[in-house]
Image (cartoon, rainbow, N blue to C red):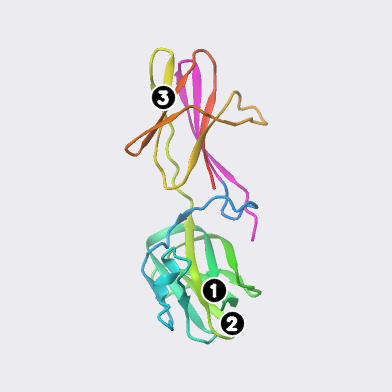
């Protein structure tokens, strides 16, 4: 895997309420970080998919169904491919190829806007099977794994073909509570976030989890801070 440094995406500093400044900051860890931290948004999940061939009822859609007990299995030859239609042109930051018994020794990842003209964005000539975690910096609607040489000579098996983009961060809002309190409010998200606070933004910043009870109503989270006169900063951090 290739290491990709985490990125921070700060929001604005909110006005003082009950003596507290609030920083709404969402932290994203890169797809390829050492700890294999953030599962990003899987753009390929249950999207239309096409392949050069399939055998033994192991159809192409099995590669994008999030079920690791199913797989796409190609014909037993080197030159095979599978591509997924993401529905529109999107910025892409990574891909996961979860190989079955027959893996790609040499293959490319390609993108296209029309499924006819392809541009290679990644090449691997030393595949060893398992899970290939691939950082990308590309844009396209269609993403194709183009098999050049099978590692076993029996074609290619994919348990999972994931294409990723950064998850959209929820916005952290602040509202007035009682005279001595304020509320932090943010929307539910497919990813998992925790609320953290720090007394200062001077490096090194010591972020600590906020342990107050969170109330969830519908798709909105709300946490009340009972504070007066103490300046504090808050952020949402995405968890693995």
Question: Whole-Å distance between the Cαs marked 1 and 3?
Answer: 49 Å
Find disc 1 in the rendering and name its residue: 100
Find disc 2 in the rendering and name its residue: 149
Determine whether the residue tagged by mark 3 lies in a helix, strand or loop.
strand
Q: Main secondary structure of the magenta part?
A: strand
Question: Whole-Å distance between the Cαs marked 1 and 2?
Answer: 15 Å
Magenta-colored stretch includes residue 50: no
Find disc 3 in the rendering and name its residue: 183
Q: Position of residue 93 (x, y in %)?
A: 52, 57
Relative horizontal placement of residue 236, taking residue 61 as reference (left or right): right
Mark before the other along the chain sequence, 2 or 3: 2
Query: Which residue is located at x 44 percent, y 65 percent?
Result: 67
Query: Which residue is located at x 50 percent, y 22 percent?
Result: 21
Question: Whole-Å distance between the Cαs marked 2 and 3?
Answer: 57 Å
What is the crowding at mark 3: few (fewer than 14 residues within 10 Å), some, or many (at least 20)?
Answer: some
Q: How many marks?
A: 3
What is the crowding at mark 1: few (fewer than 14 residues within 10 Å), some, or many (at least 20)?
Answer: many
Instruction: Please provide the residue range marked out in magenta.
Output: 1-28
Mark before the other along the chain sequence, 1 or 2: 1
Q: Position of residue 43 (x, y in %)?
A: 42, 59
Magenta-colored stretch includes residue 23: yes
Which of the two residues, 144 or 73, is positioned nearer the viewer here? 73
Q: Position of residue 205 (x, y in %)?
A: 64, 30
**Which is in the foreground here, disc 2 or disc 3?**
3
Determine whether the residue tagged by mark 2 lies in a helix, strand or loop.
strand
Determine whether the residue tagged by mark 1 lies in a helix, strand or loop.
loop
Q: Quadrant of residue 154?
A: bottom right
Q: Is 31 drawn above or below residue 111 in the view shown? A: above
Query: Which residue is located at x 64 percent, y 75 percent?
Result: 125
Residue at the front extreme, as displayed: 69
Query: Which residue is located at x 64 percent, y 30 percent?
Result: 206
Relative horizontal placement of residue 52, taking residue 103 as reference (left or right): left
């Amino acid at each position: 895997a290739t290491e990709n440094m985490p990125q921070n995406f700060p929001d604005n500093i909110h006005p003082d309420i009950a003596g507290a400044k609030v920083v709404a900051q969402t932290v994203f860890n890169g797809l390829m970080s050492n700890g294999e931290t953030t599962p990003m948004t899987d753009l390929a999940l249950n999207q239309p998919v096409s392949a050069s061939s399939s055998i033994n009822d192991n159809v192409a859609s099995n590669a994008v169904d999030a079920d690791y007990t199913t797989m796409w299995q190609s014909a037993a030859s080197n030159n095979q491919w599978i591509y997924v239609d993401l529905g529109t042109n999107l910025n892409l930051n990574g891909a996961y190829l979860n190989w079955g018994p027959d893996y790609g020794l040499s293959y490319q990842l390609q993108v296209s806007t029309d499924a006819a003209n392809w541009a290679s964005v990644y090449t691997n000539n030393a595949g060893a099977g398992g899970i290939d975690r691939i950082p990308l910096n590309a844009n396209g609607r269609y993403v194709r794994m183009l098999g050049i040489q099978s590692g076993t000579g029996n074609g290619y098996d994919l348990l999972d073909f994931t294409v990723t983009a950064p998850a959209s961060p929820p916005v952290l809002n602040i509202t007035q509570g009682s005279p001595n309190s304020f509320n932090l409010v943010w929307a539910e998200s497919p990813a998992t976030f925790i609320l953290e606070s720090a007394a200062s933004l001077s490096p090194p910043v010591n972020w600590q989890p906020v342990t107050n009870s969170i109330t969830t109503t519908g798709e909105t989270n709300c946490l009340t801070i009972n504070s007066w006169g103490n300046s504090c900063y808050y952020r949402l951090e995405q968890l693995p």
